[in-house]
């Protein structure tokens, strides 16, 4: 998967037309009208592909010989449901930085959501990896359930389990280069069990351990997991920063200064990890999104750089 190239003209014509008509996220609107809540077949994590496999693939090709897989995992519960809408509106900025400014070689993006498998009807959705305007289409097919429960957490671990066991990337297979997973989160995780895995991924039996640390270790073998923490009241109450830092290390966590700048933050982190210096990133963000966004994202990256230095100083 992942052929073709993303086009600003197509984005403006198609996604811009939907936005002007108030018709973005049409699948979500249709589900609310019908009362039937289920993942669209294109994003259903239990659905087999034409070869009879339950897999999401990022592959090299003539258009993209050095594919770099990127997963953006959104929280679809409660107040966090607005974030995918913001990212869709800023895809032009995201691709302008990733591709136009050379932050990433041949990026291929899969969009995903997670909720709370203990109570939600659709706690997991994930698209195939794409390099063209099918990314816009996949965003438009997301069901933003807006659920969650009062159990002090969500099941982003179900998404990480899926990525650990149901993805194949040429980046890893051919170049031993991990892809990036961006988990937009505020709350910590709650446990999942074999019944959740069976119902929401289709695995008759779990393909690995289901403890928090076990899933984190499994996914980290082939993916660099990056937590974009929305440090709201829930996150502070649950000590979510401490929870995710214990799982993935302080270098993996970025406190997002402005949830409206998620797309810019993703591009900046990829650029930072792929070798762009902070001053260049700040200048690029200023040109692409304005000084205020550049300052806020720069603050997040500066904190990330400082955390990385502190972590290395302890070793």
Image (spheres, grey):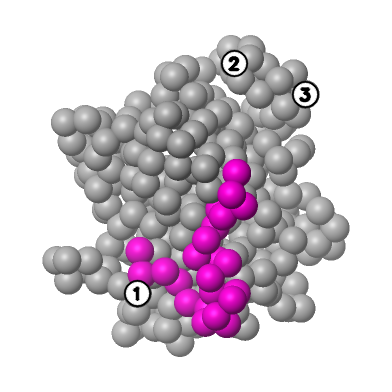
Picture quadrant where residue 309 is located: top right
Q: Is residue 160 above or below residue 145?
A: above
39 magenta-colored? yes
Q: Which residue, given by chain and number where applicable, does mark 2 sit on? A: 284
Q: How far apart are marks 2 and 3 (CA)?
A: 13 Å
User: Which sits earlier in the primary sequence, circle 2 or circle 1?
Assistant: 1
Question: Residue visible at 72% across and 27% down?
Answer: 293
Q: Which residue, given by chain and number where applicable, does mark 1 sit on? A: 46
Q: In this view, does 104 lie above or below 164?
A: above
For label 3, count other residues whose C-alpha is less than 10 Å away and answer few (under 14), some (14-19) or many (20+): few
User: Which sits earlier in the primary sequence, circle 1 or circle 3?
Assistant: 1
77 magenta-colored? no
Q: In this view, does 3 lie to the left or right of 31?
A: left
Magenta residue span? 20-42
Total number of numbered discs in the rendering? 3
Q: Where is residue 297 in the image (x, y as percent from the top left)?
A: 69, 29
Of 233 and 210, nearer the camera is: 233
Of 109 and 25, nearer the camera is: 25
Question: Residue visible at 61% across and 20% down?
Answer: 288
Q: Which residue, given by chain and number where applicable, does mark 3 sit on? A: 292
Q: Distance between the residues labelled 2 and 1?
A: 40 Å
Q: Position of residue 315 (x, y in %)?
A: 59, 35
């Amino acid at each position: 998967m992942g052929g073709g190239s993303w086009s600003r003209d197509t984005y403006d014509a198609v996604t811009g037309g939907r936005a002007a008509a108030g018709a973005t996220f049409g699948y979500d609107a249709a589900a609310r009208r019908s009362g039937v809540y289920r993942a669209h077949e294109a994003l259903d994590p239990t659905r087999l592909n034409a070869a009879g496999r339950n897999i999401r693939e990022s592959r090299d090709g003539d258009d993209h010989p050095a594919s770099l897989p990127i997963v953006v995992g959104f929280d679809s519960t409660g107040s966090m449901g607005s974030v995918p809408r913001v990212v869709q509106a800023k895809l032009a900025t995201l691709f302008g930085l990733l591709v136009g400014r050379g932050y990433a070689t041949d990026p291929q993006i899969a969009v995903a959501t997670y909720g709370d498998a203990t109570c939600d009807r659709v706690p997991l959705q994930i698209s195939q990896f794409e390099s063209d305007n099918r990314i816009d289409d996949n965003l438009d097919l997301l069901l933003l359930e807006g659920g969650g429960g009062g159990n002090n957490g969500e099941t982003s671990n179900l998404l990480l389990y899926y990525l650990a066991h149901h993805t194949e990337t040429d980046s890893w297979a051919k170049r031993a280069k991990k892809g990036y997973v961006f988990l937009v989160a505020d709350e910590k995780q709650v446990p999942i069990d074999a019944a959740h895995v069976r119902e929401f991924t289709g695995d008759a039996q779990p393909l690995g351990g289901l403890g928090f640390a076990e899933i984190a270790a499994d996914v980290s073998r082939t993916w660099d997991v990056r937590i974009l923490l929305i440090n709201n009241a829930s996150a502070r109450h649950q000590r979510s920063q401490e929870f995710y830092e214990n799982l993935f290390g302080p270098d993996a966590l970025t406190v997002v200064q402005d949830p409206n700048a998620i797309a810019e933050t993703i591009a900046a982190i990829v650029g930072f990890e792929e070798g762009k210096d902070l001053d260049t990133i700040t200048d690029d963000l200023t040109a692409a999104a304005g000084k205020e966004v550049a300052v806020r994202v720069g603050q997040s990256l500066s904190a990330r750089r400082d955390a990385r230095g502190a972590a290395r100083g302890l070793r």
